Image: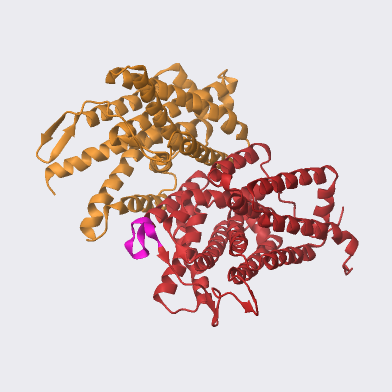
Amino acid sequence: MTLGLLSQYVFNGLMLGMIYAMVAVGFTLFFGVLDVIKFSHGDVLMVGAFTGLATYLGLEALGIDSPLTQLLVMTVVASLSMALLGALIAKYLVLPLRLAPPLNTLLITLMLGSVLREVVRLFYPQGSNPKPFPRLLPADFVSFGSFTLRADSMILLLAGFAAIVAVHLVITRTKLGLAIRAVAQDAETARIMGINFEFIVLLTFAIGSGMAALGGLMNGLYYNEINFGMGLLLGVIGFSAAVIGGLGNIYGAILGGFLFSALQSIGAVSLPALFPGTSTAYKDVFAFAVVIMFMAWRPTGLIAEKKSERV
Amino acid sequence: MKRLFDPASAAPALISMAGVTLFAVLFLHAESQSAILGLCIGMAVALFLLARFGWNALATASFAGHSRTAQASVVAGVLVIAAVFYDQHFPLLMLASVLLYIVVCLGLNIQFGYAGVVNFAGAAFFGIGCYTAAVLTNHTALPHLLVVLAGGLMAAVIGSLLILPVLRTYGHYAALITIAFGILFRVFLEVNDALGGPQGMKLPGMEIFGWKLNDGLVFGETEISFYANYVLLALAMAAVAFMLVRRLERSWIGLALDAVRLDETACAAFGIDVARWKITAFTLGNFLAGLAGAVYAMMTGFVAPNSFTFGDSLILVSIVLLGGIGNPWGLTVAAAVVVMLPEKLQFIQEYRLLLYAGLVILILLFRPGGLMPRQVRDYLPGWKP
C-alpha cells in the first residue's frame, strides 16, 4: 500500500470518527445527567438530516440559492428543531420513567426510534428511498499523488471539531455547564442547591440532540445521500463508541468514536489482505465483534465511570 | 385434600376459551377488510364490557383454579381452529407461525421476565436456528428431528459466545452487546456467499421417520393442507415449551431466577449463584428460539437475512412486553394478536412496526406490567390467609 492510499484511509477514518464522536457525545451527556440511554439518538440524527433536506428544498422553492445562506439556515433549523425534539422526548418519555427499571427507559426510547424511523419512511414523500443530499460545500481538492484532500471534507472535519470543542467549553467553563455537572454528580444535592433539575435535564437533552442534528447534516454532506435507516446503525455505533470510551465521560466518547472508525478501517483494509477472497463488507462484522470482545475485557469502558454501589 | 373437577368453577374458563376460539375462527374466516375491522372492534367492545361486569376476575380465578383444564382447552381450541380450516393453506400457516412465535417468546420471557437478562437479538437466535436447518438439510442427510435439535443447540452454542461479555456487564452495557450481536449476525449473513448472501437459501420440507410433512394427507375426496402437519408439530412444541416455562417458574429455579433479576447483591449474599442462573436462562431462551427457527425454516422452505433484522427482534420484545412481562399466558395472546392482525388487516401491514412501537410506548408509560400483568405465584390455588 502506498503512502497516499494510507493517508486516504486515515483521513476518511478521521471523518467518520468525527461523526461517530458527535453521536457518542450525545449518549454520554444523557447518561451523565440522568443515567439513562436514549436509544432514539441515532434516529433523531436521521430526522435532523431530513429536516435539513426539507429546509433546503423549501429555500430552493423560495428562490434563495446562495449555498452559504442555505447551509446556515439548514444548520440552524435542523439543530434547533432537533434540540426541541430532544427536550420533548426527555420531558414526556424519559423523565416520567425515572423511577422505573432502567430497562424500561431503554425500551421506550428504542421504540421511539422505531416510531421516528417508520414515520419518516411512511410519511416523508417517497421516504423509503434514499434521498440525494445537496452538495453545498466547495468541491475543490488538492491531490498529493494518490491522496486527494477534498475541501468539503476538511470543512466538515473542522466544523465537527468546533462543535465538540464548543460543547466541551459550555460544560467546563460556564455556569450552565457547572449546573449540568452538578446534576450529573448528584441530582439530589444539586436540587437542594437550587438548581432547576428538570430544566437542566431538558437542556442537556436539547444540546445532545442538536449535536445529533449537526452529525446528521455532516453525514448527508459527506455522503451526499441520506435514508430513513441510517440512524439505526449510527445510533448503535455511537452507543458502542460511548461505551468503549466509558459512559458519562466526554473524552471517552470522542476517543471511542475515533477508535470505532479505526476498527472499521482496519477491518476494511486488513481482512481482504489477510484472508484473500473476503469482501470489505465484513468491516462492520469485524468492528462489532471487537466491541463485544472489548466489553468482555473492560466492561465499563476505557475511562470507567467512578461509582460504588450502595447496598 | 384431593381436589375434584368442579364443573361450576371451571365454567368461566371454558366459556372464555370457547369464545376466543369462536372469535379466532370468525377472524380467520373473514375476507373483507371491513368485516375484519368490525370483528376486532366488536371484540374490543365485548372485552371492555366483560371487564366492566366483573367477568375478568371470575375467569382469572377460574383459570388459576383449573390450570390443567385451561391448558387443555387452549390446545383443544387450536385443534378446532385447525380442523375448521383443514384445507386452506393461509390460515394454517398463520396458526403455525403464531405457535412458533410463542415458543421464541417463551424463551425471551425466561431471559427478560425471570432472570432479567436482556436480549435484543431474539430474531438473530431464531435466524441461527433457521440457517442451521437450511445448511444441514441441504448438505447432510441428518434426520430432520435431529436437525431441529441442532438448530436449538447451535443457537445455544453461539449464544454462549456472548455469555462472558453479558455476565461481566450489566444494564445498558449488556443491552449493547446483544444489539451489536444482532446487527453483526445480519451483516454477516448478507455478505456471506456460502449462506446465499442477501438472496438467502431454499430448503426442503420436513420429514419425520419417513412421514413427509409437506405432503398433505388425503382421505378419499378431501385433502388436508400440509400446513396442518406443521400446526400439529408446532402445537406440540409450544405446549411442551409452555409447560416447561410454567414449571420452571413454579419451581425453586424460578424463585432463584426472580431473585437474580430483582437484586443481584442480595442474591449473592444468600448464596444464589448469579452467574449460573443467568447462563441457564440465557442459554435456555436461545435454545427455544433456535428450535422454533429450525421448524419455521423447514415450514416456509426459505430463509433470507431480511427476516432477521433488528426490527424483528424488537417485535419479539414487544410481544413479551405487551403481553405482560413474565406471564406466559399474556405473551400467548400477544403473539396471536401481533402475528395475525397485520396479516389479516392488510392496511396496517405497512404500518405494523409503527403501531407496535407506539403501543409499547403507551404500555410502558401507563401500564408497565403489560396488558396481562404477571400474578404473584399462587402455590395453593384459592387459599386465603
Q: Colour of chain A?
A: orange
Q: x, y (%) of residue B241?
A: 63, 65
* Residue beneath the point at 58% across and 42% down: B355
Is B207 displayed left or right of B11 in the figure? left
Can you give x and y, in whole percent of width and height, for residue A162 in the image?
31, 24
Q: Nearer the viewer, residue B79 or B362?
A: B79
Nearest the viewer among B263 and A144 is: A144
Whether residue B192 appears in magenta in the rendering, the answer is yes
Image: magenta residue range: B190-200
Q: Which quadrant would residue B52 be assigned to in this image? A: top right
Say how the picture is coloured: by chain
Which residue is drawn at the image coordinates 65% and 80% (left, top)?
A: B220
Q: Residue at x 52, y 41 (%)?
A: A110
Relative to B311, does residue B224 appear above or below in the rendering? below
Report whether residue A310 is seen: no
- Which chain appears red? B
Query: What is the magenta segment's predominant secondary structure?
Result: helix
In percent of width and height, residue A3 lies at 12, 43
Query: Is A27 drawn above or below residue B174 in the view shown?
Result: above
Q: Nearer the viewer, residue A193 or A129?
A: A129
Quadrant in which the N terminus of chain B is drawn: bottom right
Q: Provide residue A48's location: percent of width, then percent of height.
A: 42, 30
Q: Is residue B199 left or right of residue B322?
A: left
Reply yes or no: does residue B111 show up in magenta: no
